[in-house]
Image (cartoon, helix red, strand yellow):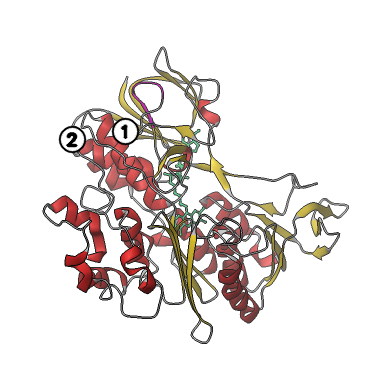
Amino acid sequence: MAKYLIAGNSVAAVSAIQAIRSIDADGEIVVLSPERITAYCRPLITYILAGDVEEWRLPYKRESFYQQNNVKVLYGVALEGVDTEKRVAYLSDGDTMPFEKLLLAVGGKPFIPPIENVEGPDVYTYTTVSDMNALRERLAEIKRVVVVGAGMIGMKVAEALKKCGKEVTIVELMDRILPMVLDRKGSEFAERALDKAGVSYVLGDSVVGIHRDASGRVKQVELKSGTKIDCDTVVVAVGVRPNLEPVKDSGIETNRGIIVDDTLETNVEGIYAAGDCAEAYDIILGQKRPNLVWPVAYRQGFIAGLNMAGYRRRYVGGFPINSIGFFGFQVCSAGMSAVEDEVNGSFEILTYVDEEKGVYRKAVIGNNRLLGFAVIGDVRRAGLYTGLIWSRMDVSYFKDKLVTDVSFPEAIYPLEGALPAMNFSSRKSIRRFGWAVFPYSYRRLFTGYSARIEEICAFDEKGVCLYGGDDDQG
Ligand SMILES: Cc1cc2nc3c(=O)[nH]c(=O)nc-3n(C[C@H](O)[C@H](O)[C@H](O)COP(=O)(O)OP(=O)(O)OC[C@H]3O[C@@H](n4cnc5c(N)ncnc54)[C@H](O)[C@@H]3O)c2cc1C
C-alpha cells in the first residue's frame, strides 16, 4: 500500500512531494507518470521549439530529486480509475494500488472543438513534450501553418513557428488576441506587434473544417465566414480543460474541474486534487473555478501535500495570473483583466494609454477593490497590482493615481498614516499589504525579471504566497 499516491508528475505533484517530505520523512510516496520523463517546465516547450531556450533546461526536476526525496515513480503508468470505498487505484498497466492518501494532480487536456476532418495527420495540439517532438519531427517540411486560437498557448506556438521561418495565420473566434486577458484596446497593441512581425490573423471567425488531399494530408482550412486559408499544418490551441477522465464514475465530485474544499480535499476523505485539474476557490469571483496557471498549481500542490501529511493549512484561494510576451509585445495580467466597461457597468475601469511608447495600463475595480489588471509595454507595476488584489485593500484613496504615469507606489506612500484600514501591528498585516509598504523590495524583485512567472507571485520558502495569507491551522 502506498501511504501517499500521487497521480501526475508535474508542478502540482512536485510541490506536494516537497510539502509531504517537510513533515513526513519516511512515508512511502508513489508517483504515477504516464509521460516517461521527469517533471518538466511545460511553459518552455514553445521556446525550445523556437530554439530560444536550450533543451537541457527542460527538466523542472531531475531524477536526483525523486531519489533524494525517496519517491518511487512509475513511468509510463496512468491512473485509470479510483474505487473510493476500497481505496484502490486502477492503473493503466492493469495493476491496482491501494492507497492511504491520494493526490489527483493530473493536469489539463487540450480541448478540440468540433472541426470537420480534424482527426488525421498534420493536425497538432501543443501542451506536452510529445506534442513538441511530433511537430519538430515534421518541421522541415512545414511551410504554412494555421494556429486555431489566439490564447496564451496559441500565441506562443505562433511565435515559435514564425521564428522557425514558417508562414503563420492565427484564427480566433473572439474579436481580440488573448481574449481571456485583453480587452479590445489591449488587443490593438498585440495586433500591431503581429503586423510588424508579418503574422496574419483573423479575428471574430472560427475554423469549421479542414480540407485534405487524396492522401489525407492537410491542404486548407475553411472558416465559418466561408474564407479558405491554404496551409499544410494546423495547430489547435483553443484552450485546456481540467482532466476529469481518471475520476469518471468514481463518486469524486466534479464540475468544470475536480471540486475541492479549502484544504484541497475532494468530497472523499483522504483524496485531494491540485493544479490544472482542480476546481478551487477563486478570491476574485468569490466562487470555485479551475485556474490553469503554473503558480496556482504550485501553491495548491504544496498546500494539498501539507494537509495530506497531517499538517492543517487552509488554501484561501487564488486567481489567474499571467505574464506573456510574443513578437516584442509583453503583457502582465491578473484577475478580471479582460472586462470591457460597456459589457458590464458594475465595474469601474481605469485605463492609461501612451500610444507612442506602447504603454497601456488597465485596472478593473469593484467595490473599491482591485479585481484585475493588465499592463502592456511597461510591466513594472505588475507585482504591486498583484499585491493589491491579494490584500483586498481599499484603493479608493489613491484610485486617481492607480494607472496614471506617476511614480508608484510612492504615490500612495505618504498616505500610509491616513488610511484607516492600514494597521501594521502584526507581521501578518504587513504581509497583507504587500508591496504597498515595501516599494523597494518590490522594485528589486520585479523590475529585473518582469517576464519570469514565478516572480509575479512571490512565495515564501514553503511555497505559500507571501501576500495571500493562507492560514496555518496546524
Ligand atoms: C505551452 C504552454 C505554455 C504555458 N505557459 C504558461 C505561462 O507562461 N505561465 C503560466 O502560469 N502557465 C503556463 N502554462 C500552464 C502551466 O504549464 C500549467 O498551469 C501547469 O503545468 C499545471 O500544472 P499541473 O501540475 O496541474 O499539471 P500539468 O503540468 O498539466 O501536468 C499533469 C501531469 O499529470 C499527468 N497525467 C495526465 N493524465 C494522467 C493520468 N490519468 N494518471 C496519472 N497522471 C496523469 C501528466 O503526464 C503530467 O505529468 C503553459 C502551458 C503550456 C502547455
Q: Residue at x 38, y 58 (%)?
A: 368
Q: Marks 2/1: CA distance?
A: 16 Å
Asked if residue 243 lies left or right of residue 220, the reply is: left
Q: Quadrant of residue 442?
A: bottom left
Count neighbours of disc 2 (C-alpha within 10 A) and say few if under 14, some if 14 to 19, many if 20 or more: some
Q: Is residue 186 above or below residue 457?
A: below
Nearest the viewer among 176 and 451 is 176
Residue that label 2 marks: 23
Q: Quadrant of residue 401?
A: bottom left
Q: Amino acid at mark 1?
A: Thr
Is 268 magenta? The answer is: yes
Residue sitting farthest toward the bottom: 356
Q: Residue at x 29, y 54 (%)?
A: 391
Q: Earlier in the sequence, mark 2 or mark 1?
A: 2
Nearest the viewer among 41 and 375 is 375
Asked if residue 255 lies left or right of residue 413, the reply is: right
Magenta segment main secondary structure: loop
Q: Residue at x 76, y 47 (%)?
A: 115
Q: Quadrant of the C terminus?
A: top left
Is 404 magenta? The answer is: no
Checking the image for residue 370, the label placed there is none
Residue that label 1 marks: 263
Q: Which residues are magenta?
A: 267-272
Asked if residue 287 lies left or right of residue 220, the reply is: left
Count neighbours of disc 1 (C-alpha within 10 A) and say few if under 14, some if 14 to 19, many if 20 or more: many
